Amino acid sequence: MSATAEILVPGKAGEGEALVLTAPISFWGGVDPKTGRIADVRHPQHGEVIAGRVLFLPGTIGSSSASAVLMELVHNGRAPAALVLHEPDAILLLGLIVAREMGWETPIAVRLGRDAFDTYSGRVRIAEDGALNVSGE
């Protein structure tokens, strides 16, 4: 499976195991910035690690602190390898923009239709131009 996604925030090309979330998540209190693990016990994928994975987000649950949590994940080396969003989340993406301004290497963030999320599994690579490929293609 391959596609080209709209780049929301440029960053380092990323490759990792796909983690397609089945429900929206709040980064504030929902993700541990020290471990990169989903900490919200109510989330269907509680305990999964987002660090180093291509994270497909069907949505986020708003908190103005989401950008700070994502920035901490980047700083701690626990950020996803890439972010794939169904809809842009300006507050979340601000964390990547500020991290990049701080001189930290940030993952790419792209937009892709929600209907395509479930077609991605296994290892996924997102190039700097937004091209998504399942490894081996």
Image: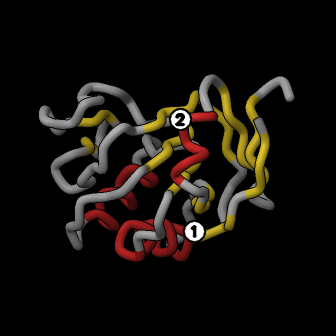
| Residue at the image position 21 percent from the left and 46 percent from the top | 30
What kind of residue is marked 2?
Answer: Arg
> Which one is in front, 49 or 137?
137
For the residues labelled 2 and 1, say whether their Cβ atoms are less than 8 Å apart: no
Foreground tag (2 vs 1)? 2
What kind of residue is marked 1?
Answer: Gly
Which quadrant of the rendered structure holds the N terminus?
A: top right
| Residue 56, position as x, y percentages in the image | 49, 45
| Residue at the image position 54 percent from the left and 76 percent from the top | 101
Q: Name the residue under label 2.
A: 53
Is residue 67 in view?
A: yes
- Badge 2 marks a residue whose secondary structure is loop
| Residue 49, position as x, y percentages in the image | 38, 30
Looking at the image, residue 9 sits to the left or right of residue 37; the answer is right
- Badge 1 marks a residue whose secondary structure is loop
Is residue 105 in view?
A: no
| Residue 17, position as x, y percentages in the image | 58, 28
Sooner in the amino-acid sequence: mark 2 or mark 1? 2
| Residue 78, position as x, y percentages in the image | 43, 41
Residue placed furthest toward the right: 137
Q: In which quarter of the image is residue 2?
A: top right
| Residue at the image position 56 percent from the left and 32 percent from the top | 18
Disc 1 residue crowd, few under 14, some 14–19, many 20+, Cα 10 Å: few
Q: Mark 1 points at which residue?
A: 103
Disc 2 residue crowd, few under 14, some 14–19, many 20+, Cα 10 Å: many
> Which one is in front, 76 or 32?
32
| Residue at the image position 13 percent from the left and 32 percent from the top | 41
Q: Quadrant of residue 103?
A: bottom right
